[in-house]
Image: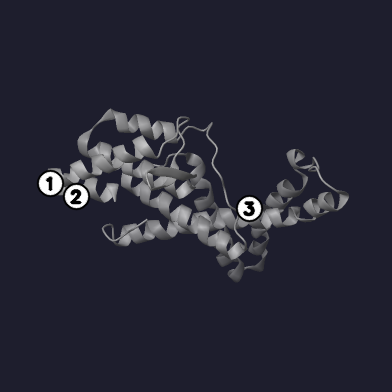
Amino acid sequence: MISSLAKGGRILNEPRYTVAAKTAADFIIRKLKTKDGRLLHRFRDNTAGIQGFLDDYAFFINSLLDLYETIFALSYLKEKKVFLDPSMKILYYPRGSFRSLFRQYFRYGRGRAYTAWKHRKLTSWRQAGPVALVFYLFSSACLGVVNPFYWLLLLPYPLLVSTVAIVRPGWKKAPRGTDDERTASRALRPLLAYAFMTMHVSWGVGFIWASFRHILSPRGMRA
């Protein structure tokens, strides 16, 4: 809502929309930000609660950028830096299936593409990794149809991820608990490799899908 109002005020030269966007952003900063800089999820009965989710941070930061581009108040850029502080930790709720995990990271990649095309830059070169990976896997698969030898090019990535997931030194330490719990933890490590691959590929596919959609219809793309 804040982004829409800020853009509307800027494009239509309508001060009411700009004031409404600023009022909404100031309310969130005043009522939904904790003393240590965390973002809360909801405000009801004059009480804020529920720790913010990743989507809350992403959308609000993007709203602050849109508002800054409308009124050029540096205070909103400073707020953005607070919410991007790497020392902060937020809750993450794991998905119950690989399908839901794929959909989640597809949306993340799609949203990052929207931001990258809007501001004409990637916030980190690391974000180009999943995109390059998807192109590499797709090209290898296509070449494998012509010559089966190229199917071998698909092996290094899953082998590397599986090795890291299973034998990485930081994960060798057994968690506290019974012997059965520690055995179950070791048995689940191969699934960690599938989770990593799902996240990498789905993020890259989401980014590429949104990028093609932007190229074909720049005004029609939505995050």
* Front residue of this view, candidates 33 and 195: 33
Q: Amino acid at mark 1?
A: Glu
Q: Which is more foreground, mark 3 or mark 2?
A: 2
At x 43% / y 55%, what residue is drawn? 110
Q: Amino acid at mark 2?
A: Gly
From the image, tell me which residue sits under label 1.
Answer: 14
From the image, tell me which residue sits under label 2.
Answer: 8
Q: Quadrant of the C terminus?
A: bottom left
| Mark before the other along the chain sequence, 3 or 1 | 1
Tell me the tag on residue 196. Answer: 3
Crowding at dot 1, Cα within 10 Å, few <14 / some 14-19 / many 20+, comes out as: some
Query: Measured along the vertical axis of the image, is residue 92 above or below residue 141?
Result: above
* Residue 215 in sight: yes
Image coords of residue 215 (percent x, y): 32, 58
For numbered disc 1, what is the local secondary structure?
loop
Identify the image quadrant of residue 98: bottom right
